[in-house]
Image: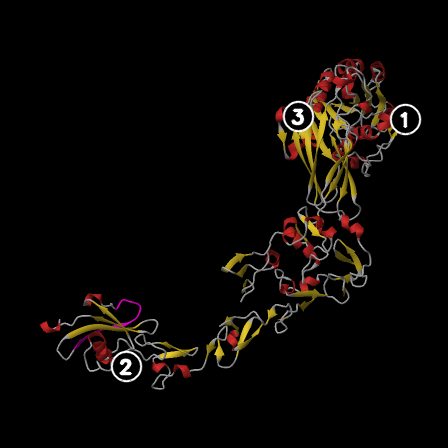
Amino acid sequence: MTDELVLCRFTILTRVELHKMDLKVLFIATLSGIICYSCAQQEGNDCIKANAKSCGECITVGEKCGWCTDPVFLKQGEPTSARCDELESLKKKGCHVTLIENPRGSVTFNKNVPVTDRSKNGAEKLDPKDITQIQPQKITLNLRSGETQSFNLKFKRAEDYPIDLYYLMDLSSSMKDDLENVKNLGTSLMVEMSKITSDFRIGFGTFVEKPNISTTPAKLLNPCTGDQSCTSPFSYKNVLKLTSDGKQFNTVVGQQQISENLGSPESGFDAIMQVAVCGEAIGWRNVTRLLVFSTDAGFHFAGDGKLGGILLPNDGKCHLENNMYTMSHYYDYPSVAQLVQKLSDNNIRIIFAVTEEFQPVYKKLQNLIPKSAIGTLSANSSNVINLIIDAYNSLSSEVILENSKLPNGVTITYQSHCKNGLVGEGENGRKCSSIYIGDEVSFKISVQAHKCPKQGQSEVIKIKPLGFTEEVEIVLNFICECSCQADGEKDSPICHNGNGTFECGACRCNDGRIGRQCECSTEDVFSDDMDANCRRDNGAEICSNNGDCVCGTCECKKRENPEERYSGKFCECDNFNCDRSNNKLCGGHGRCECRVCICDPNYTGSACDCSMDTTTCLASNKQICNGRGTCECGSCRCTNPKFQGPTCEICPTCPGVCTEHKECVQCRAFGTGEKKDTCERDCSYFNLIKVKDRDKLPQPVQAFPLMHCKERDANDCWFYYTYAVNNNAEKEVHVVETLDGRWMCG
């Protein structure tokens, strides 16, 4: 008998018992005979493998796992973890559906204002805070491990949505002609932007470089050469806060002077950082925010400050005093990553308006900054208005969703449903293109938790379209406990005199206690996993399903019959499941130990049904099996194929057989011969079968040996017959019913 094969003789097992047995093949005796069932051990069942000790542990394994709260659900020898299983398995094992704890997640819409439809509001001008482009605005997700919760997000570009545009210009001497053209930008841009929105504001800022010029007093006052008048050098200056007065923009820009420095790359990154983080000084509203960056030169970035002895990394904070960046000599230039983060955090879309010479450099930068655009600035910035309009349309026609940092163990996926029935998956599921004013698109967003957080039960994440101020706030609640735990009885007497809380049909043990009923102290047990000490191996049942694991030791079950018992370290042995012979355990000639027969003296075999006594094998000549065989289990096995019979003394084909039986055949077949008077007494030891002619006699191709005989009687007549001993040790004689020879024999 092996671990993989058990003969369950004359036992009808229930489905519940079958499910619990850790066997690969079961043979079950039924009324109609023995039926073979394949019951491969359950593999891939995460609920069982988790070895959950409580309902809370169980439901966090996966969405398929349920916990049976029925106090009497467990069978003798089953651990508490057996309460955690797949739902269908629990039902099959007898747990009523009303007693299965199986919480599900949910989606709740806390704020779900519809997106703004301007056709309903007519030409009425709305406050920016009253315009909705994204729906919903706030939701709560109750997440259970492994279960996905999904919701739809709508986005619609609103008509007449307010726009703030800040124009950031390089004021190095090479931009002198550009400054002249930008002086009229305010009113001209107001006219063009009025075609897009009635609520437009514009601001202006300039930058040159960190102190990288001649330090002579005259150069500090006027860094330009010759009789050209220039302003003192600076890193960044906020010239005009965002305003809806285009004429004021023209006036302020007209008062600006160019400056000069010694190097070609400029401090544009310093300026972008301050524009992004100094929201109050710039005047940003929670509307569409555009930053136009205009230059004909490259840029310095993090690390370049070392050339001027500046080692402290940029801190990403606002340092404006009197609208001047005052810490350029103290902090290094920002990194590209810092700019990307700050522009995203403040919902600013940047437009690079750069000369053709620097297009390759800024295109690489554009690829690193989401929701940015680039346009070719003419030599004197005369095309700046068209560049801004084109870039704005390009930026606004694409919506890309981004989310804040996710809690550990939480994943999110997107599926976009764009115009013309286009559906996007993966990274393409985050975006839709060719979106114009009034267009509505939607996204299916799916969130899944793979485990519960270690601290706290709630987290908040946010999703928003890049470059837009509106966002969806998502509150994540994690289902880490079962509702039945609220009704738990603390220090319950059921849990070994109050050593645990009785909840959800089982004991949750106090610190320092373990066991199904918290009956064990961790100081007395070598391992927290007591069940492991009660298994022969990882795939075996606890105590071989024949006992209870008590504090890491198997206590075997008792049997109704006191003569029958389980034994062994893992209760793997018994004294009643050995082979039987003649319906007797071990043939009545031995005892059963650990499912193996220990035979009495002179008996052997798996059922002790083989006698080693040779007296039954003695032939008439006092030889064992007539010297022509071996005595096995009290019977002869003839080694000479000619000999048969219980003692190998019968030889149907040996010489003299025909003469030996002649007289009896003659008297029984024809009523003649020397034994005709004593025929009934002496010749009844064989079966006689008459045939019509010699062709009907048996041939020596049958299963047992035979002898063909031809004998002559007293009248000189011949008769023909065969002699054989069949497989049942019966002697058979086939005889031709007519004599042969002279004419009088017929």
Q: Nearer the viewer, mark 3 or mark 2?
A: 2
Kindly report the distance in space between the C-alpha atoms of the residues bearing marks 3 and 2. Answer: 116 Å
- In this rendering, is residue 276 above or below 694? above
Q: Is residue 709 magenta?
A: yes
Give the residue at mark 2.
Answer: 681
Is there CB contact under 8 Å for labels 2 and 1?
no
Q: Amino acid at mark 2?
A: Arg
Say if 173 sits above or below 633 in the image: above
Residue 344 x, y percent position in the rendering:
76, 31
Query: Which image quarter: residue 592?
Result: bottom right
State the residue at coordinates (76%, 58%): 507
Crowdedness near tag 1: few (<14), some (14–19) or many (≥20) residues, C-alpha within 10 Å? few
Does label 1 or label 3 sit earlier along the sequence?
Answer: 1
Disc nearer the start of the sequence (3/2): 3
Going by the numbered disc 1, the residue's amino acid type is Asn
Secondary structure under badge 1?
loop
Q: Which mark is residue 581?
A: none
Spatial CA span between label 1 and label 3: 42 Å
| Dot 3: element | loop
Q: Amino acid at mark 3?
A: Ser
Query: Toward the viewer: 705 or 716?
Result: 716
